[in-house]
Image (cartoon, rainbow, N blue to C red):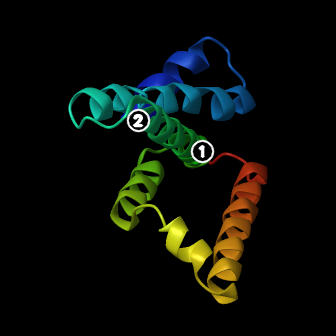
Amino acid sequence: MFRGCMLPLLSSARFTDSALVLGCPLFFGAAHLHHAWELHTVRHVPLHAALLSASFQCAYTTLFGALATLLLLRTGTLAAPLAAHVFCNWMGLPDFARILGGGLASRLLLLAGILAFAAGTAVLWRTPAWP
């Protein structure tokens, strides 16, 4: 829904595709910053830990937002970013502490996943929009 509302608005302001992919996700990431306040005031997490957690969440939602924006621009439908969002929510974040604390194979698989994500995004970036 976020992209379905924001992209037409920013597009009508004559933002380029590059600006949309890089700019719109910043709004999406910033929309998650309120979690710091919730963590601190409701769950009584120390302020520095709440800010660190919210900053990390802002960073990864901004990264995901860039991918979702690119999916919407390339497919012309909300179905692709919606499916990606559902899949990401279902999978959750990787357990980085466990992966990095594990053996070499775990770290290599994490690196392979990051590289595959980057390569897929690069291909998607070069793919023309659907009519």
Spot occupied by residue 129 in the image (x, y as percentages of width and height): 67, 45
Judging from the image, what secondary structure is the residue with disc 1 in?
helix
Spot occupied by residue 97 in the image (x, y as percentages of width and height): 53, 68
Position of 35 relative to 110 (above/below): above
**Sequence order check, earlier mark of 2 and 1:** 2
Q: Quadrant of the N terminus?
A: top left
Which mark, residue 123? none
Q: Amino acid at mark 2?
A: Ala
**Farthest top residue?**
13
Whether residue 16 sits left or right of residue 100 in the image: it is right
Cα–Cα gap, marks 2 and 1 = 20 Å
The residue that label 1 is drawn on is: 63
The residue that label 2 is drawn on is: 50
Q: Amino acid at mark 1?
A: Leu
126 and 88: which is toward the camera? 88
**Front tag of 2 and 1:** 2
Position of 54 relative to 120 (above/below): above
Judging from the image, what secondary structure is the residue with disc 2 in?
helix
13 and 128: which is toward the camera? 13
